[in-house]
Amino acid sequence: MWVTASKDFCYDDVVGDVKTGQLFELRGQPNDGGLLKHRLVLPVEPQPDKEALKHYPQCGECGRRFLEPWQRERCGRMHELSAAELRAARREETGKRLDKLRDAGELS
Ligand SMILES: [Zn+2]
């Protein structure tokens, strides 16, 4: 069954993290009933076939499909954020390396 996530959570080892609005297929996990009951996921109506899926907004970064364009935009922003964070972390790492070299007297 195709469903859409009503919040960010980790579904299983295969699907992994799902984001708000993301379309994915339930894989018959033991807690599928609970997810539906607690409306953590909502059935997609009508159930999409391969062709219909192509019409849902897709994140250009990770390929996830979403119910609404804003959810796709949010996914894109999260990728940008983590890319920026990675860059910041790398800069910090480089800074530390330089400090070490300086401490070691290899750099003046
Ligand atoms: Zn994405």
Image (tube, grey):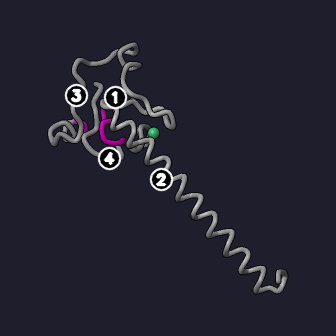
Segment tinted magenta in the rendering: 18-32
Question: Between tags 4 and 2, which lies in front?
Answer: 2
Query: Which one is in front, 34 or 72?
Result: 72
Could you say which is closer to the camera, residue 73 or residue 58?
Answer: 73
Disc 2 to disc 1, how far (Cα)? 27 Å
| Dot 3 alpha-carbon crowd within 10 angstroms: few under 14, some 14 to 19, many 20 or more | some
Classify mark 4 as within 8 Å of ligand 1 or not, answering yes or no: no
Q: Secondary structure at mark 1?
A: strand
Question: What's the residue type where badge 4 is placed?
Answer: Asp
Which circle, 2 or 3, is nearer the viewer?
A: 2
For badge 2, the amino acid type reads Leu
Mark 2 or mark 1, which is nearer to you? 2
Residue 43 is tagged as: 3
The quadrant in which residue 89 appears is bottom right
| C-alpha distance separating marks 2 and 3 | 30 Å
**Which residue position is annotated with label 1?**
25
Q: Which residue is mark 4?
A: 8
Alpha carbon separation for disc pair 1 and 3? 10 Å
Q: Give the residue at the far right of this rendering.
A: 106
Going by the image, does 64 lie left or right of 106? left
CB contact under 8 Å: marks 3 and 4: no
Sequence-earlier tag: 4 or 2: 4
